[in-house]
Amino acid sequence: MFGAGITSDVFGVLWATTIQREIPERALSRISSYDRFGAALLSPQGHTLRTAAEASSTAAVSSDVEHPVGEETAG
């Protein structure tokens, strides 16, 4: 979690700096609003994908615990 927070903060600073440096001042407000709208629009999909990824990784870990590598399973 800590690493994800640091990574998110670094990305946020770099993104905001790039937007401010590369977008003309007359268009900065409009581009920033589109950026925030897109982030808000895609947030539920991101949470859904994260939940699915966590569920699949938890299932993979639990199956490894039930059948450790090197041990034969009956059947």
Image: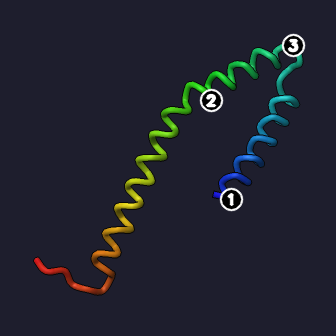
Q: Amino acid at mark 1?
A: Phe
State if disc 1 and disc 3 touch (CB < 8 Å).
no
Work out whether mark 3 precedes mark 1 in sequence or the reverse, and give the earlier one: 1
- Residues 47 and 25: in front is 47
Q: Which residue carries the number 1 mark?
A: 2
Q: Amino acid at mark 3?
A: Arg
SS at circle 2: helix
Q: Amino acid at mark 2?
A: Ala
In the shown orientation, is residue 6 left or right of residue 58? right
Q: CA distance from mark 3 to mark 1?
A: 37 Å
SS at circle 3: helix
Whole-percent x, y for residue 11 in the image: 74, 45
Q: Which residue carries the number 3 mark?
A: 26
Q: Looking at the image, is 53 positioned above or below residue 23?
A: below
Q: Looking at the image, is 59 positioned above or below residue 24?
A: below
State if disc 3 and disc 2 touch (CB < 8 Å).
no
Quadrant position of the N terminus in the picture = bottom right
In the shown orientation, is residue 38 left or right of residue 28? left
Work out whether mark 1 precedes mark 2 in sequence or the reverse, and give the earlier one: 1
Quadrant position of the C terminus in the picture = bottom left
x 36%, y 64%: residue: 60
x 34%, y 75%: residue: 65
Would you identify the image quadrant in which residue 58 lies?
bottom left
Q: Which residue carries the number 2 mark?
A: 39
In the shown orientation, is residue 26 left or right of residue 3? right
Q: CA distance from mark 2 to mark 3?
A: 22 Å
Label 3 Cα neighbours within 10 Å, binned few <14 / some 14-19 / many ≥20: few
Q: Which mark is residue 49?
A: none
x 48%, y 46%: residue: 50
State if disc 2 and disc 1 touch (CB < 8 Å).
no
